[in-house]
Amino acid sequence: MSSVVVITGSAGLIGSEAVRHFAGLGMDVVGLDNDMRGYFFGADGSTKGNLERLTKEIGDRYTHHGIDIRDREGLDKLFAGLGKNIGLVIHAAAQPSHDWAAREPFTDFDVNAVGTINMLEATRRHAKDAPFIFTSTNKVYGDLPNSLPLIEQDTRWELPADHKWYGGIDETMSIDQCLHSVFGASKVAADVMVQEYGRYFDMPTAVFRGGTLTGPGHSAAELHGFLAYVMRCVMEQRLYRIFGYKGKQVRDAIHSSDLVSAFEAFHAAPRVAEVYNMGGGRTSNCSVLEAFQIASSIAGVEAQTEYVPENRVGDHQWWISSTARFEEHYPDWSVKYDVPMILQDMYESNKDLWKP
Ligand SMILES: NC(=O)c1ccc[n+]([C@@H]2O[C@H](COP(=O)([O-])OP(=O)(O)OC[C@H]3O[C@@H](n4cnc5c(N)ncnc54)[C@H](O)[C@@H]3O)[C@@H](O)[C@H]2O)c1
């Protein structure tokens, strides 16, 4: 069996979790990351520290390349050298923020959309049979989830229990004719292209549309990394600004290790041109207000929050993913972490780092 896994965004939250996981399974990992997160979000966002920890921890099984995924020739050369040894590609490098994308639409599109076709084409030319996993986003559904008939409860917005998507929104929701944000649109382009390389070229590609992906490896920044930033603000006694929806907006959250175990299941039994909504579902979800209640009780301190009535453009008022399609294809997989466990894990991992 081909034993090299190529992982882009290898120093980021999902990439670094995937590096650890697949190296732990005995695969050689080739990681690509140019620390562009530092450019996007400043020093708070840099993944340089993650990379240093990773290189020390994994040793010889990990080889790092600072290649930019916009560098088509660089990617082609790297893939040509590895050739058929490549047994899996996980493409997790991206410009991941809604709000940032509007600052530099060309950069956002070049990284998210063009970077993805660069990766697909390098794979098609040199390792066509390797499963190709792409981390898409639920933002491909734009603001359509906001048209759901939500009801207001004490601490959250909620769907009526008899609604077909009460258990979570599935992949049949349209991605068309709605407001996406510049980021959402560049991810749609990448998402559809990954499907197309599956259908048109018969490659084993899969799109994982994440909700809130999170875990202790998150370099928490205000513009990206919701739960990590909540925990960090509580622990550092920093002011957190809640944008709109009375703070009752609901997200489901999936721990990076649960996501990566889904990647492993796909790698073991790949399919062609699949699309999966991927999140914590009904097991792991919370509103912003509820996240603060849980984080404050874990840290034993009051949260400092400020309410800004205007919501973020295209922000979801309620999102819970249905993972039924994935579970039907991979019945051994399930979510292991819920929100309190995720926040506890963040607290333990960062208690020497995040102080008032
Ligand atoms: N974290 C979430 O809540 C979430 C939710 C839905 C989807 N996603 C998607 O999952 C993927 C991974 O997200 P994450 O949270 O791990 O992000 P992250 O920012 O932690 O990691 C991405 C990594 O990619 C690197 N990178 C960015 N541009 C690059 C380029 N041009 N060349 C090489 N490397 C580059 C960054 O330096 C960073 O280390 C992204 O595609 C993101 O859109 C994330």
Image (cartoon, rainbow, N blue to C red):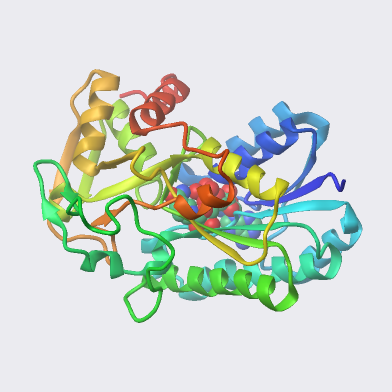
- For the C terminus, the image quarter is top left
Could you say where residue 185 lies in the image, as x and y percent from the top left?
44, 74
Vertical comparison of 249 with 315: above or below: above
| Picture quadrant where residue 143 is located | bottom left
Count of numbered marks: 0
User: In screen coordinates, is 254 left or right of 31?
Assistant: left
- Res. 38 visible in picture: no
Q: Residue at x 74, y 75 (%)?
A: 201
| Picture quadrant where residue 259 is located | top right
- Which residue is more in the foreground, 243 or 68? 243
Vertical comparison of 12 with 340: above or below: below
- Which residue is more in the foreground, 24 or 174? 174
Could you say where residue 176 lies in the image, as x and y percent from the top left?
39, 79
Q: Residue furthest bottom?
A: 177
- Res. 353 visible in picture: yes
Vertical comparison of 171 with 201: above or below: above
User: In screen coordinates, is 161 left or right of 6?
Assistant: left
Q: Residue at x 67, y 59 (%)?
A: 271
Could you say where residue 344 lies in the image, as x and y percent from the top left?
38, 24
Vertical comparison of 108 with 280: above or below: below
User: In screen coordinates, is 311 left or right of 41?
Assistant: left
Q: Which residue is drawn at 36% across and 37% down?
A: 283
Q: Which residue is drawn at 46% across and 71% down?
A: 104
Could you say where residue 132 lies in the image, as x and y percent from the top left?
69, 59
| Picture quadrant where residue 102 is located | bottom left
User: In screen coordinates, is 308 left or right of 11?
Assistant: left
